[in-house]
Image (cartoon, rainbow, N blue to C red):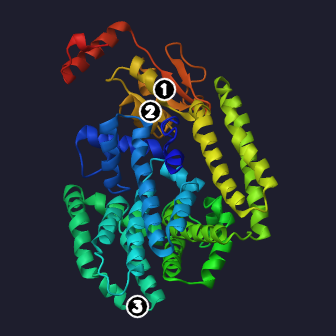
Amino acid sequence: MVLFALGAWLGRVDLLTPDEARHAEIAREMFLEGNWLVPRIYGEPYYDKPALFYWLTGSSLWLFGPTAWAARLPSVAGALFSIVMTSWWVRSAWGLGAARWTTMLMGTTLFFVAVGRYVVIDMLLTASLTGALSWLGVVLNDPIGKRRPVWPMYACTAIGALAKGPVALVVVAGVAVVAAAFERRPALLLRLHPFRGALLIAALAGPWYAAAYATDPLYIETFLWQHNFARYALPGALAHQEPWYFYFLALPIVLLPWSILLPAALAAAWKSPTAGVRHALAWATVVVGFFSFSQTKIPTYVLSAFPPLLALTAVYVDDVLTRRVEMPRAMEFATVGWTVLAAAIAVAGAVWIVIESPASWTRPVLAAPAIAIAVWTYRHARDSAALAAAIVGSSLALIAMVYGGAADAVNARESQRDAARIVLDLVPPWSALTSYRVAPHALAFYAGRYIRRADDPESAVPELFAGSDAALLTRAKFLQELGLDPMPSWMKLVWTAGDGQVLVLGGRPAEEFAAGQARWRRREGVEPSADR
């Protein structure tokens, strides 16, 4: 089930812009140029993030080729690792039944699955924090005399520091301190050997920080200051400024469908605060509390709070089913309402698929399972086991609908892959390839080309108006301000996406084309017979 949720149709949706395609293009260029220290995009330094995620993504692209599913494999692996580690910790604290339900809940939480199938760094950070804090939870559950090694906790923390930055150290240290306070065991902090742990983190993560600073000091300074401290502490420094209570409003949404049962699970956990419960509460409290003070807030920041919250929910579900008791009526109504909502979303998605991609008219049949589950749930609303199964089934039905049914419609609307095929066929490697007010990262990835980004009309079109065989990626609504509406006779609109993206090709006399081709051959050392 988990493998289906995270892996089915992994490559059917082309890389999405801007985030997915940007990270994939950075990884592609890193391997192409052999520059392992400082990430770059279009040959320019990219100072936002550390290098580990790009190492992993680039390795996957090198092994499996430049495809969407290969670029997404590191995120999938991070999600699977998070599920395995959380279930391992839950088994040590509550037993096998709760561990199985934890696996099921994490594999059907829609936002968690979506991020796990997306080329983004947050899932790698979540995996590292989940590994470290799950290990800490197992240590807390050990008998007093047991001496379990703690170095894996620090190794996972070092991976988090290489994935996202110092935030991993802060979160792990914060949870350890709060957990020790909840347990009333201050000596636990000494049991964790923090000095040795700090040395291990420095040994694992320090070499890259030192080498990157020696190569490009501005990289580390910008990354640490602007994208860590300023993003966290300075109002208005970057986008996504939200009020302090943002996550308390967002969590019930991003934890769907299991946020339906979360209030009852938290109430049950509060009544019997075992060591596992105390660790889960410390974990979730520190993550949500820490990021609530951040000036910049994005739902993926608190993804590492999902494991403890879903673990408590899994324990509640397992306890209800084991004791064969009915869930509260409010939970019954909420579950039926969720399955009806899932069916409505599936039907709306089916209509949208037919509109956006008429050739995919058979795909809407994937809406049928969600509808059937809603009807079945209504008839079995008093059966707790049926309700839990219905939530799982409706989530899997939506995952199948989105990634199996809607893929062609999504690609028809915004994928740049067809534009890349045109560039490969019609735009010579030595020609100018420009984008204007459109993120071109997917085009660059699929075409294997650097793209110049223009910020104003004057810099976007000189190659086109010079009569050169150049190409411009933009949107139809910008053609008039670019002076391309009406379009000159030597230009051609060769591609249009459903969201308004267009690709414009210029042209030039054949003798000029041949001369440019010859110059490129000499520069690249390509024999004439190697030309297409």
Dot label at residue 419: 1
Residue at 42% from the left image edge and 23% from the top image edge: 423
Residue at 44% from the left image edge and 49% from the top image edge: 76
Of residue 170 and residue 134, the one placed in the foreground of this image is 134
| Distance between mark 1 and mark 3 Cα atoms | 61 Å
Q: Nearer the viewer, mark 1 or mark 3?
A: 3
Question: Which residue type carries mark 2?
Answer: Leu
* Image location (x, y in percent) of residue 368: 72, 39
Q: Secondary structure at mark 3?
A: loop
Of residue 310 and residue 250, the one placed in the foreground of this image is 310
Q: Is residue 15 above or below residue 433?
A: below
User: Contact (CB < 8 A) between labels 3 and 2?
Assistant: no
What residue is pinned by disc 3? 185
Pick the quarter of the image with the C terminus: top left
- Return the disc, 1 or 2, that comes first in the chain's sequence: 1
* Image location (x, y in percent) of residue 391: 67, 56
| Distance between mark 3 and mark 2 Cα atoms | 55 Å
What residue is pinned by disc 2? 443
Dot label at residue 457: none
| Distance between mark 1 and mark 2 Cα atoms | 7 Å
Q: Is residue 511 above or below residue 124?
A: above
- Return the disc, 1 or 3, that comes first in the chain's sequence: 3
* Image location (x, y in percent) of residue 28: 33, 39
Q: Is residue 43 visible?
A: no
Q: Is residue 118 above or below residue 93?
A: above
* Horizontal arrangement in the rendering, residue 33 relative to residue 242 (left or right): left
Q: Which residue is outermost to the right? A: 379
Question: Which residue type carries mark 1?
Answer: Ala
User: Contact (CB < 8 A) between labels 1 and 2?
Assistant: yes
Of residue 36 and residue 196, the one placed in the foreground of this image is 196
